[in-house]
C-alpha cells in the first residue's frame, strides 16, 4: 500500500480564509488517518498580489491551530527552472505546440463561437503549423481530441469529461512564465502527492491537469472535491454574512479546537457527538461520508460549540487563555478578591473569551453607564432598594446561602415577584440585569463593595 501524501496549496494574496482552514484540516486528517504526510506549498506565482506578509500569516496560523506540515513548505516562485524543464519535455514528446494567435484573433474566435451557439474555446488552429518559438508565442498542450477522462472522486464518485470539450490550455505564456496548471501538476509530482483534496471549484481543472500528467508520464492521483463553504444566504462565504479570516475568529475569543470542530462539520457528519477534538476527528472521519452539497457556515453553531469547548477547560487553562482579553480592557485577573470564584461563575456567561471579558468589567471597575431601560422597567420604587440595602448590611455571614435566604424571605413577606427584588440589586452591582444567581453574585462582591454599589445607584436615582 502506497504512503498517502496530501497537500494544502494556498496563494498568499490575503489572510488565511476560514474555508482554506477547512480544506487544510481535511487534508491533514486524511493524511494522519493513513499514517501519511501533510504538506504545504505556497502558490505565489502571482507576483503582483502575493506578499510575504500574507504568506507568514497563512503559515503561522496553520501551525498555531495545529495543522503543521510534515516537511518545510515550498514556494512556486523559487521553482521556475523545474517547470520550464517539464514544459520542454512535453514539447519534445509532441504533446505541445507553439501558438501565435493574437488577443484580437482569440476574441474574434470567441465571439463567433458564441454567435453560433457553441462553447467558446480555443479551436486548435495553430496545432499543426509547426511554429517556432518567439516573443509572441505561447506554448499550448495538445489535448486529445476524442475519448474521455474519468475521475474517480472519493466524494462524488465517477465524473466524466469529454476531451472534445477541453481546449488546448496554455502551459507557458509569451514571456516564458509557466501557468497555474503546469506548476500545479509538476509540484504534486515533485512533492510525491498521492491525494488531492480541494474545493469543488477546482473540478473543471482536474481533467486538464490529468492531461498534463499523462503528457509527462506521471502516475495517477486520487481526488476529492469538497463542497464549498457557504454563508447563511447560501452564497459563497464572504464578509457580507460572516468574518472570513481565521484571525478574526481567534481575536474574538473562539478556541482553536472549537473552530476546527465547527469546520470539520462543514460537509461532514457522523455519529451523535457534535463536540469533538482532533484525535476524535482522526479516529472517526471518513472522506467518503463528506456531502456533495454546499456546506453552510452558521455562526450560531460555532458559538454553541465554543461554549462547550470553553466548559471543558480546566479553571487554570480558562484563566490563562482569558487573561489576554482582560488585558485589552486594562484588567488584571487577580485584582479581584474572589477571582477563582468569579471566573467559575462567569465562564458560561458568553460564548467567547471576548464576550466573557467584557461581562467581567463591572466586577473589576466602577460602573460608568447603567442600562436605563432596565432601571425604568424594574425600579419603580426606590424604597425597595433602600430596604434591601439595609437588610444586606445586617448580614454577618456573607455567603451565597445566607444572602439567598434573606432575599427570599423579603420577597415572600412583601409579596413581590423575584425580578422586583433581584433586578434592582443586579443593576446596582453590574449596571445591567445580567449576572449569575444573585446570591452568588453578591457573595463574589465583598459586602462593603456591594453596599457601595447600591448606594451609588440610589444617589443616581435621587
Image: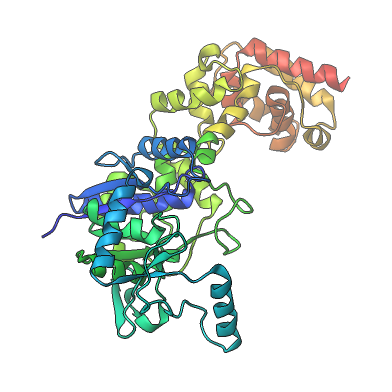
Residue 360 against residue 120 in the figure, above or below: above
Q: Seen in the image, is 292 located left or right of residue 434?
A: left
Foreground: 19 or 316?
A: 19
Q: How is the image coloured?
A: rainbow
Q: Quadrant of the N terminus?
A: bottom left
The image position of residue 411, as x and y in percent, is 70, 31
The answer to whether residue 349 is seen in the rendering is: yes
Residue 219 against residue 20 in the figure, above or below: below
Residue 313 against residue 239 in the figure, above or below: above
Q: Residue at x 61, y 86 (%)?
A: 115
Q: Residue at x 30, y 67 (%)?
A: 212
How many marks do you count on the picture?
0
Residue 288 against residue 342 in the figure, above or below: below
The image position of residue 459, as x and y in percent, is 84, 16
Q: Residue at x 68, y 23 (%)?
A: 429
Foreground: 379 or 104?
A: 104
The answer to whether residue 286 is seen in the rendering is: no
Amino acid at each position: 500500500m502506497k504512503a498517502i501524501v496530501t497537500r494544502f496549496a494556498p496563494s498568499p494574496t490575503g489572510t488565511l480564509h476560514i474555508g482554506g482552514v477547512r480544506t487544510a484540516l481535511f487534508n491533514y486528517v486524511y493524511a494522519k488517518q493513513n499514517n501519511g504526510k501533510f504538506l504545504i506549498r505556497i502558490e505565489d506565482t502571482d507576483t503582483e498580489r502575493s506578499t510575504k506578509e500574507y504568506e507568514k500569516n497563512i503559515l503561522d496560523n496553520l501551525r498555531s491551530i495545529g495543522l503543521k506540515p510534515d516537511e518545510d513548505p515550498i514556494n512556486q516562485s523559487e521553482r521556475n527552472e523545474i517547470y520550464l524543464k517539464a514544459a520542454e519535455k512535453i514539447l519534445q514528446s509532441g504533446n505541445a505546440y507553439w501558438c501565435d494567435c493574437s488577443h484580437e484573433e482569440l476574441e474574434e474566435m470567441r465571439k463567433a463561437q458564441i454567435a453560433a451557439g457553441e462553447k467558446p474555446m480555443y479551436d486548435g488552429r495553430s496545432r499543426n503549423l509547426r511554429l517556432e518559438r518567439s516573443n509572441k508565442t505561447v506554448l499550448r498542450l495538445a489535448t486529445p481530441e476524442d475519448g474521455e477522462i474519468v475521475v474517480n472522486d472519493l466524494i462524488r464518485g465517477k465524473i466524466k469529461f469529454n476531451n472534445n470539450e477541453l481546449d488546448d490550455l496554455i502551459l507557458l505564456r509569451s514571456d516564458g512564465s509557466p501557468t497555474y496548471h503546469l506548476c500545479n501538476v509538476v509540484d504534486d509530482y515533485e512533492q510525491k502527492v498521492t491525494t488531492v483534496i480541494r474545493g469543488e471549484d477546482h473540478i473543471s481543472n482536474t481533467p486538464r491537469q490529468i492531461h498534463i500528467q499523462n503528457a509527462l508520464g506521471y502516475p495517477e492521483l486520487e481526488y476529492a472535491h469538497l463542497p464549498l463553504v457557504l454563508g447563511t444566504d447560501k452564497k459563497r462565504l464572504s464578509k457580507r454574512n460572516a468574518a472570513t479570516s481565521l484571525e478574526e475568529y481567534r481575536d474574538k475569543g473562539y478556541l482553536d479546537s472549537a473552530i476546527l470542530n465547527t469546520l470539520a462539520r462543514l460537509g461532514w457528519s457522523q455519529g451523535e457527538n457534535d463536540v469533538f477534538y482532533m484525535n476524535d476527528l482522526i479516529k472517526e472521519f471518513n472522506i467518503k461520508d463528506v456531502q456533495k452539497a454546499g456546506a453552510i457556515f452558521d455562526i450560531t453553531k460555532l458559538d454553541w460549540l465554543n461554549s462547550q469547548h470553553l466548559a471543558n477547560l480546566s479553571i487554570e487553562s480558562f484563566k490563562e487563555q482569558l487573561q489576554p482579553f482582560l488585558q485589552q480592557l486594562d484588567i488584571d485577573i487577580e485584582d479581584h478578591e474572589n477571582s477563582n470564584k468569579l471566573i467559575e461563575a462567569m465562564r458560561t456567561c458568553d460564548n467567547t473569551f471576548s464576550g466573557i471579558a467584557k461581562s467581567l468589567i463591572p466586577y473589576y471597575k466602577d460602573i460608568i453607564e447603567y442600562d436605563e431601560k432596565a432601571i425604568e422597567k424594574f425600579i419603580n420604587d426606590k424604597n425597595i432598594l433602600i430596604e434591601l440595602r439595609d437588610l444586606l448590611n445586617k448580614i454577618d455571614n456573607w455567603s451565597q446561602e445566607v444572602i439567598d435566604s434573606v432575599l427570599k424571605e423579603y420577597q415572600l413577606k412583601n409579596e413581590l415577584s423575584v425580578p422586583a427584588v433581584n433586578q434592582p440589586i443586579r443593576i446596582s452591582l453590574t449596571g445591567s440585569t445580567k449576572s449569575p444567581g444573585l446570591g452568588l453574585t453578591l457573595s463574589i462582591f465583598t459586602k462593603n463593595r456591594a453596599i457601595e454599589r447600591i448606594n451609588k445607584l440610589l444617589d443616581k436615582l435621587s
